[in-house]
């Protein structure tokens, strides 16, 4: 569009300049004197300009005639293709000019012009490997997908253009949402060019979407060999694929395969929270409690997480509350001021029915950072402290509409997940989940405004406590041990 406007402006300027020049020549008085061979010729200015143009035309015709005569002479001395080459050169030149103009029109978004130029280039050049792709892309730009598909299929017939044809059909299938066919095409393209970065990305994304973790690991290896990813990214993705294979093996009942895959994932990336939590449970079930503890501590140093708390509790499921509180000090001392640590301390205090200590641990989090967890913890503390039922109900009612706190949120589409998964369930993006609190919906009204008679207003916090209730069941945690792994 912009290029067309530029050409139109240039044409108008040229027309204006030509008209101005002709007017100036016509209005110029006098004549042009030409002396040659003892004779003199007098021409008007406009006649002189016309004479110059005629001479240029004659000179161009003489050059063309000389070229043809040269080709004819070569033909007469035995070169049978001399004359055909002479005409082919002219046709190829015009064909390449049309091809170049078609590419420019395609880049400018002029679909109709691109089709016309591509058709002309195809007729003049007779080089389908050059013109079919231009025709296909021009047809796509014009919205003629069937015509584009016809050209892409024609590209499959030539070994030099087969890969391009497959990629073109693959793109169409992706646009149509036919991922099954797209996956097969991506595999064929991979067989032709195993180091093509764009196709490797497409193949990996499709395999991840289909939960083909074995195929995805092979593609990841190909990406590594093609130097398409940094080593640390390859290592992390390999760990995630191992963890995904472990999850799949658990569903299939293959515990040995699941154990091998999850331990491999934890070895590759010790700070990957889901892998660390699962690997610690595996080690604990095998009696390797020290190894399980080390796995949790390593991951906790990177980021405290409730899954690590649950897995750490599962190492000693039958221990006394005193021993449990003592053992959890290993985690508390690593990040004493972290939100998750405060919630952990509150849970431990609640499990020991030490409600003042729980209140000290949670402090004023229920007011400064009201989430389902913090509000339900405050409800448990108030109930354990013998507060009025109205106060307890107020906290629980607020918990129903409060933020769920940190969750596994997709950084690409913002979708929140209750559990970690290798690919987002909403946009199917791979390895995009991050542990953070999703933004609260702007249209949600506070619970006090919706149910003022039922909710009431809780008292000001005593700045003493914190606890770790189950956000999905805030009532039941009041009388439950939140670190009981059986309940978890």
Image: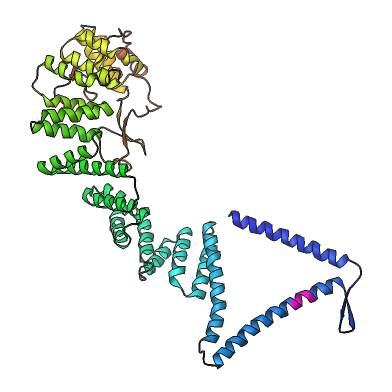
Residue 63: percent from the left, percent from the top?
66, 81
| Magenta range | 51-55
Quadrant containing the C terminus in the rendered view: top left
Q: Nearer the viewer, residue 385 or 335?
A: 335
* Picture layout, residue 170 above or below residue 277: below
Identify the image's colour scheme: rainbow, by chain, secondary structure or one colour: rainbow
Q: Nearer the viewer, residue 146 or 37?
A: 37
Horizontally, residue 97 falls left or right of residue 46, namely left
Residue 235: percent from the left, percent from the top?
27, 43
Quadrant containing the N terminus in the rendered view: bottom right
Principal SS element in the magenta part?
A: helix
Residue 160 visible to an observer of this rendering = yes
Residue 194: percent from the left, percent from the top?
31, 58
* Picture layout, residue 452 above or below residue 156: above
* Picture layout, residue 32 above or below residue 183: below
Residue 259: percent from the left, percent from the top?
13, 40
Asked if the stretch drawn in magenta spans residue 173, the answer is no
Residue pictured at 42% horizontal, 63% vertical: 148
Residue 480 visible to an observer of this rendering = no
Location of residue 405 (image quadrant): top left
Horizontally, residue 56 falls left or right of residue 366, namely right
Residue pictured at 16% horizontal, 32% vertical: 280
Q: How many marks?
A: 0
Location of residue 311 (image quadrant): top left
Residue furthest to the right in view is: 30
Residue pictured at 41% horizontal, 67% vertical: 151
């Amino acid at each position: 569009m912009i290029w067309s406007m530029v050409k139109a402006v240039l044409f108008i300027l040229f027309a204006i300049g030509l008209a101005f020049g002709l007017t100036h020549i016509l209005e110029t008085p006098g004549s042009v004197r030409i002396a040659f061979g003892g004779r003199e010729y007098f021409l008007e200015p406009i006649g002189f300009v016309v004479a110059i143009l005629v001479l240029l035309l004659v000179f161009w015709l003489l050059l063309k005639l000389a070229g043809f005569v040269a080709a004819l002479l070569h033909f007469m001395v035995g070169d049978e293709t001399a004359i055909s080459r002479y005409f082919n050169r002219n046709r190829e030149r015009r064909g390449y000019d049309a091809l170049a103009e078609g590419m420019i029109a395609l880049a400018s978004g002029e679909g109709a012009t691109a089709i016309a130029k591509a058709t002309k280039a195809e007729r003049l050049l007779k080089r389908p490997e050059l013109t079919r792709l231009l025709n296909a892309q021009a047809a796509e730009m014009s919205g003629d997908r069937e015509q584009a598909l016809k050209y892409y299929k024609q590209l499959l017939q030539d070994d030099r253009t087969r890969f391009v044809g497959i990629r073109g059909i693959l793109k169409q299938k992706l646009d149509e949402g036919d991922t099954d066919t797209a996956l097969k095409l991506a595999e064929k393209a991979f067989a032709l060019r195993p180091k093509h970065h764009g196709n490797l990305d497409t193949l990996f994304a499709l395999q991840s979407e289909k939960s083909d973790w074995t195929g995805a690991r092979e593609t990841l290896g190909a990406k590594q060999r093609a130097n398409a990813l940094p080593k640390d990214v390859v290592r992390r993705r390999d760990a995630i694929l191992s963890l995904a294979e472990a999850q799949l093996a658990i569903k299939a009942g293959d515990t040995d395969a699941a154990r091998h895959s999850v331990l491999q994932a934890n070895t590759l990336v010790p700070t990957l929270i889901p892998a660390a939590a699962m690997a610690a449970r595996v080690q604990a079930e095998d009696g390797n409690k020290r190894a399980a503890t080390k796995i949790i501590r390593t991951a906790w140093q990177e980021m405290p997480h409730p899954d690590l708390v649950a897995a750490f509790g599962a190492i000693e499921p039958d221990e006394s509350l005193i021993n449990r509180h003592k053992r959890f000090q290993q985690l508390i001392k690593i990040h004493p001021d972290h939100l998750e640590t405060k919630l952990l301390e509150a849970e431990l205090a609640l499990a020991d029915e030490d409600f003042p200590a729980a209140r000290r641990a949670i402090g004023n989090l229920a007011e400064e950072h009201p989430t389902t967890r913090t509000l339900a913890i405050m409800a448990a503390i108030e109930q354990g402290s013998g507060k009025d039922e109205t106060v307890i109900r107020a906290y629980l009612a607020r918990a129903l509409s409060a933020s769920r706190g940190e969750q596994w949120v997709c950084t690409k589409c913002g979708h929140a997940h209750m559990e970690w998964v290798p690919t987002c369930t909403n946009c199917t993006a791979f390895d995009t989940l991050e542990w953070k609190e999703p933004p609260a919906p702007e249209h949600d009204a506070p619970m006090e405004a919706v149910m003022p008679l039922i909710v009431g207003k809780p008292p000001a916090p005593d700045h003493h406590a914190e606890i770790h209730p189950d956000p999905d069941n805030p009532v039941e945690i009041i009388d439950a041990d939140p670190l009981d792994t059986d309940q978890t």
